Image (cartoon, rainbow, N blue to C red):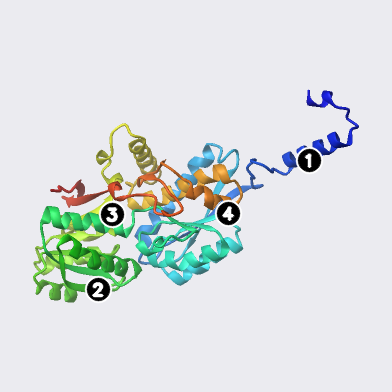
Amino acid sequence: MLLRRFRVGTPVVLLALFVALSLTAFGCGTQVQKPKDFYKIGGVLSTSGPAAPLGQPEQRSLMLFEEQINAKGGIDGVKVKFIIEDDESDPAKAAVAINKLIKQENVLAVIGSSSTGATLAMAPVASKEKITQVCCAAGTKITQPVNEWVFRTPPTDSMAITKVLQYLKNTLKVTEIAILHDSNAFGTGGADELQSKAPGYGIQVVAREQYGSTDTDMTAQLTKIKQTPAQALVVWGTNPGPASIAKNMQQLGMTIPYIGSHGIASKKFIELGGPAANGVVFPAGRLLIPSSIPAGSEWRKAVDEFSAAYKKKYGMDIDTYAAHGWDAGLIITDALKRAGNDPIKLRDEIEKTSKLVGIDGIYTYSPTNHDGLNVSDLIMIKIVNGAWTEAKSS
């Protein structure tokens, strides 16, 4: 109809038509650019080494996510492909892996890593190359201060430590504690924050000891702690170390409460700790006890569906780390719907994410908040007869 109003031979009309057709052909304006084959997303996960109990469920979730989203047609007809590299729980190898994914595979974004140390090693590369990194690690230093290119899926150390200190003060009513932590970045960072925040809750740290990530016997450190007036022990680390500590405490006849970090929020801790795991309390996402999430809510529905799909695919229950992997995939692909094949716009769209229902919680990011979740997404969990139960709080 528009063409009938003008003479086709008019130069101005011809120029206008040419510009309009060019914009359509080359996808300018608001049209989303699509890749020719796949939306390629990289992943650097610790699928071997000490952090494998974290990285393996994250990888399983991403493979399940890829299968499900592609079965539904991908993103506007374009399939998603996750390209996973194993950093072997080594920060140096994580840095090499992210470089490979960016420069050789030309990925749009990178998920990872599983541990705080490996994640921190990757972050400078993501920033330099201007590629979004969505991590599955909890160390506070990863996103505070905010790194323009790095976002997080799990609750932060700071959130977990707040829950722990509230529990120590309000439920256990203790005033003196000991800290035993992994010597890696996650353990040290958490211990530092615990020590700095404890006085604000009227709690004094009377002993602080550390262990190596591959250590299996911490009786020497525990013997020192046993000689102090500590009324509770806070262990900050990820499996397998914390499980060994639970068994060592039992062997030494130590009966003070054992409070763990959110780094033990998997059945692997119960498997490794055996009967000694009973009684251990730790902060974790509500997904581990779905009844703690309001029935009928979108969040509860998402958790129930993910749990059923994961169980069907792998014959295993979901854990915190499985949730981290799934949510990382969700956050990136949700933004891809708006950003298309543009890594810069992808970062911007992730930062605009608001009220996105995931498994760990409901994500909202902003230019000043790349953490996404908040303290209310966590609960305190107690292991009773080899099972997770919600810990009673006062």
Where does the image place residue 349, in percent across and percent down from the top left?
52, 47
Label located before the other in sequence (4 or 1): 1
Label located before the other in sequence (4 or 3): 3
Side of 303 relative to 379 (left or right):
right
Residue at 55%, 66% in the rendered image? 128
The amino acid marked with disc number 4 is Ile
The amino acid marked with disc number 1 is Val
In this view, the mark in front (3 or 1): 1
Q: Quadrant of residue 141?
A: bottom left
Around disc 1, counting alpha carbons within 10 Å, would you say few (fewer than 14), some (14 to 19), or many (20 or more)? Answer: few
The amino acid marked with disc number 3 is Ala
* Mark 4 → mark 1, Cα distance in angstroms: 26 Å
Work out whether 211 lies above or below 112: below
Where does the image place residue 65, in percent across and percent down from the top left?
46, 45
Q: State yes or no: discs 3 and 1 in contact (Cβ < 8 Å).
A: no
Label located before the other in sequence (3 or 1): 1
Residue annotated with mark 4: 344
Residue at 17%, 76% in the rendered image? 220
Secondary structure under tag 2 reads strand
Instruction: Report if residue 255 is visible in the image.
Output: yes
* Mark 2 → mark 1, Cα distance in angstroms: 67 Å
In this view, the mark in front (2 or 4): 4
Secondary structure under tag 1 reads helix
Residue annotated with mark 2: 210
Q: Which label belongs to residue 265?
A: 3
In this view, the mark in front (4 or 3): 4
Where does the image place residue 162, in percent across and percent down from the top left?
24, 56
